[in-house]
Amino acid sequence: MRLRTVLATATAGLAAATCLTAAGPANAGENHACSPSVAIQGFSDALDKTTYQGTYVGNFSALAVDRNGDLAALSDRSSLFTLDRRTLQPKSVVQLADENGTALDSEGLVVERDGTRLISSETEPSVRRYSRDGKILDRLPVPASLQVAPAGRAVTNGTFEGLTMLPGGRTLLASMEYALSGDTAGIVRWQTWKRHHGTFGLGAQYAYRADTGLGVPEVTALPDGRFLVLERGFTSGVGNTVRLYLADPRRATDTGGIDTLTGQDGVRLVKKTLLADLVNCPTLGATAKQPQPNPLLDNIESMTITGWTKGRLKVLLASDDNQNATQTTRFYDLRVSTAPR
C-alpha cells in the first residue's frame, strides 16, 4: 500500500546472496543491536531517485532471492527489477500487467524454483503466476469476502501485501494489510493455497492481530514453518513505526468459515513475539528527508531472507519511497536470531 508513509528459491541461491556493500558510515566496533534478537549491519541509499532504462527505480513493495542469488525487487508501479546481489545495481526490468494490459498495484512476490514469479496485487486483490519475461501463466482463486467492496468486505488499499511460500513449495500464503469491514480493527486475515498437481487451490485461513494503528506490509516464511512479520504505520509530523515480529501459526484457528472476527469469539490467533522495534536501531549516520523518530526509518515495506544458519537469519529490508521527494529508497541489512522451535 502507498502510505506516506521466497523461501521457495534454491538454498544455493540464498547462500550466494550477500549483505549490502554500500552501508552507512558505522564503525566496526560500534554496537549495532536494535534489540537482543536483531542487529543492523548496514544500509544503502544507492538506488534512491535513480532510473534504469527509462524506468524509475523505487516504489519497492517486495523482495525475493532469485535462483542465481540475484535479488528480484518488485515495484508497486508494475516494474519487476533484477538487482545485482552485491552492488544492488539493476541488471534488468520487466513490466507487469493484468489480463487486460492494465498496470497492477503489485505488492507481494515469490520466486519459484523454476523461475516462475507469483505476484499479488491489492487492487482486486489477486495472485497471478508470471513467467520470467512477464507473461501471465494463470491466476489463483480468491475468497469472495477478501475482495474489495462492494464485491467483498476488504477496504481499498488494504488487501494482499505479504506473499510467501512455505518450506517444501506446496503452500502459499498471502497476508491482508488491514482488517475486513466487520472484523475488529487490527485483526488481519492470512489466506493460504495448497498446490496439487501443479495447481493452487484454496487452503486454510488464519487471523493475526497487528498492533494498534499498524498494518502488515510483509510476511516471510522461515525454514521451520514460522514467519517473520513486518508491521508498519505512519503518523504525519512524527514518521514511521516499523516492528519485526516472529509469528507461529501452529495452533491458530482456520477462520475461512468464520464471517466476523471480534477477538472475543474463541478464535485462536496466530501467536506473535516481538523481535525488534526498529526505532531502537542505531542510526548508523542515516539522515531522513521528513520527520522520523529515528532518521534510519522510512516506509519499510519489503523483506526477504538471504541466508540462515541454526536460527540465525540474514534479512534484507527495503523501503517504498512512493516516488516522493521527502522519502527515501533505502535497503537495510539485518541479522536476526530466532529461538528454536
Image (cartoon, rainbow, N blue to C red):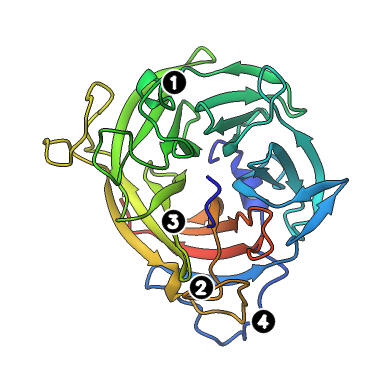
Circle 2 or circle 3, nearest the eye: 2
Tell me which numbered mark, 4 or 1, is placed earlier along the sequence: 4
Instruction: Using the image, tell me which numbered label, if any, was put on residue 25.
Output: 4
Specify whether 208 is left or right of 142. Answer: left
**Residue, disc 1:** 142
Say whether marks 3 and 4 touch (CB < 8 Å).
no
Say whether marks 2 and 4 touch (CB < 8 Å).
no
- Percent from the top left, x then y, of residue 26? 62, 82
- Percent from the top left, x then y, of residue 141? 47, 17
Q: Residue type at mark 3?
A: Arg
Tell me which numbered mark, 1 or 2, is placed earlier along the sequence: 1
Q: Residue type at mark 4?
A: Pro
* Disc 4 residue crowd, few under 14, some 14–19, many 20+, Cα 10 Å: few
Q: Residue type at mark 2?
A: Gln
**Residue, disc 3:** 232
Q: Quadrant of residue 332?
A: bottom right
Instruction: Using the image, tell me which numbered label, if any, was put on residue 292.
Output: 2
Kind of element beneath mark 2: loop
